Image (spheres, rainbow, N blue to C red):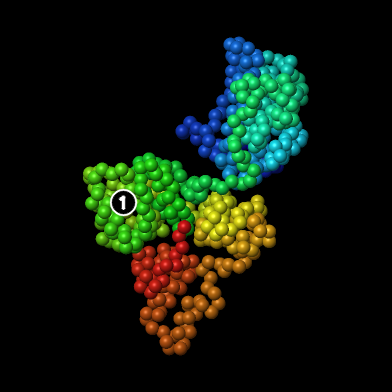
Amino acid sequence: MKTDSAQNDLLTRGGRPTLRDLLDLLEFNPAKGTILLNGERMLLTRASLGADIRDQLIRRYSEHEAMVLMLRLGFRAGREDAEFIRKSWPTLDPGDAFTAGTRLHMVTGTVKVETLSNDFDFDNDRFSGDFLWHDSVEASAYHRSHGRATKPVCWMQTGYAAGYASVFFRKLVIYKETSCSAMGHKSCRVVGKTVDGWGRDDPFVRMFLDEVLGNTSEPSLAPTRVLRPTVPEDLDALIVAPVRDRLEILARSGAPALITGPSGAGLRSAARWLHRQRAAETGFIITHAQAAELGDRLASLRQTHGLRRSTTPLLAISAIETLPADRQWMLLDLLTAEKGRPPQVVALAGCSPEALFSLPDFLPELAHALNVLPIPMPALAQRRADIPAIARGLLPAMASAEGAVSQVLSDDALARLAQIDLPGNIPQLRTLIRRAALLAATPGIIRAEDLAAAEAVAAPIGTAVAGTDPWSRVADEFRAGTITLDSLNATLLRGALSDAGGNIAAAARLLGLTRPQMAYRLAQIGGGATETRD
C-alpha cells in the first residue's frame, strides 16, 4: 500500500481500528479477482460510476426520486458497515466502533473526514456531531460533470452516515449537508442529530422517515445495542485463522487431515473447527492415540464401513505419532478401503510431516494416507499480531468456567502480550492471564503492570526449582552411593522433559529418541502425563 511517510501519524490516530489497522487487513488478490477487507468482499471502481448512476436516475425518474433512492442505498450501506465493524472487532470499545465509520469512509477513498465536534451518550441516546468532508467523491464527480451545484449533492454519503450512526442508538440519527464543495465551498459540512434533536416536524426529517425509510416511523433498529465489549463467538476460529483456507478445503472434501504443530498451538481447536464446518453431516469423536477405547472405535468403524449412515463421522486422533502398530494397520485399512465412504480422519501430531515419515515405528503407508493436505499450526511466536485477539477470546470462557468477574485487557496489556515470549503457546497464555487477573490492582481490568507482576511470579519454562534439579540429584546419589541404573534412567528422562518444558517430542530429541520411544519410557516410570496440549 503506497502511503506518504508524513501520513504515518494520521494512519495510527484515533481508536481501533485505526486507518493502519484497516489498511493492514486490506487484501488484493488479482489471481482470484478479489479485494477483501478483513474477509469481506470489496470493489475498486471508477469514482464517476456513482455520478453516472445519479444522472441516469434523474433522467428516468426525477431529481427528488433519485435523491431518495441514493439516500436509501447509502443508509443501508452504512448499517452494513457498522455491523461489519461490530462483527470483525467484537470486543471493541463502543465509542471506537462508533467513530470507526469515519475511518472506513476514508480508507475506501470516499472522503477525508475532519471532526469538528462529536458528542454522544449511548445510554441516554444523545448525539450531535459536526464534521467537514474534504475531497468528497460525490461532490467532485458532480462538479467535474456539471460544474457548480446550486444545492448539496452528497446524497449517498449523507445516507451512509445516518445508517452507520443509527446502529448504535435506539433513536434514528439523521445527517444534513449544510454546505458542499460542489457549490464552491472549500469543503462539505455535515451535521448529525437524533430525530428528536432535529424535531419530527423538520421537512428533511419527515421526508427521510416517509420516503427514504419506506413509510415507517423508525428503521428496524436492533432490539439491543452493543454498549460493552461483546464475547467472540468462536475462539477456535481466532486460533485457526492462519490455516483456515486449508481447513475449509478439507471440510468440503472430507479428505484425511494431518494437523501438526508444537504443544499448545491449537491442534485440537483446528479439529473442533473442522468438525463444526461439517456439523450437519458428521458426528464427532476425539481421542488420544494411546486411549484404550480407540481400538474399539476403529474396529467398529471398519465393520460399519460401506453401510449407509445418517452421518459420516469425524474421528480426531491426537498424538498420532504414538499410535501402536496394530491400530496403525486398522486405521490404514479404514482409509484405503475401496468401497464406501470412510469417516474423515483428523490426525494431530506434535511433529512435522517429515518427522512422521522418519519415525521407525510408524507405517510409511499410513503417513502417506494422512498427508493429503497437511495443516501446520504455527506457534504463537510466529503469529504475535494475533495474540491480543486470542487473549481477548480466552477471557469469557475463563470467567464462565471459574465463576469470576469478566475481565478486560487494557490496550497496554494487549501490546505487552504481543511482546512476551510464550513457548508454551495458548495454555501458557491462558495461565498468564489468569495469574494477572488475580494480581490485578483494579478488579476486572488487567493492565501491563499486572502482566509484569504475573511474569515475575512464574519461573521460566524449563528452569528447575532450586534443590530439585534432577541433574543435581544424580550427583548427590552418586556421592552417596545410592544410584542405580533404573534411577539414573528415570532421572535422565525426567531431566530431559524438564529441560524441554514438558514437551515430549523436544525431550525425545534431546536424548536421541523418537517421540513414541520417549512416551513409552515415560509411561514406564509414571512420567508421561506432564505434557501440556491445548
Would residue 341 appear left or right of 478 to someone viewing this image? Answer: left
Q: Position of residue 335 (x, y in %)?
A: 28, 49
Q: Position of residue 77 (x, y in %)?
A: 59, 29
Q: Nearer the viewer, residue 430 or 183?
A: 430
Would residue 214 appear left or right of 311 to someone viewing this image? Answer: right
> Furthest residue to the bottom?
480
What's the residue at 63%, 20% (across, down)? 211
Can residue 516 be seen here? yes
Q: Which residue is mark 1?
A: 368
Above or below for 524 versus 162: below
Above or below for 147 versus 216: above
Q: Position of residue 145 (x, y in %)?
A: 66, 15
What's the residue at 61%, 68% (across, down)? 457
Describe the element under mark 1 as helix, strand or loop.
Answer: helix
Which quarter shows the N terminus? top right
What's the residue at 59%, 46% (across, down)? 230
Q: Please tell me in which quadrant of the rendered image residue 492 appears.
A: bottom left
What's the residue at 44%, 42% (across, down)? 245
**Amino acid type for the residue under numbered disc 1:** His
Q: Please tell me in which quadrant of the rendered image residue 177 appears.
A: top right
Q: Position of residue 139 (x, y in %)?
A: 68, 22
Can residue 112 be seen here? no
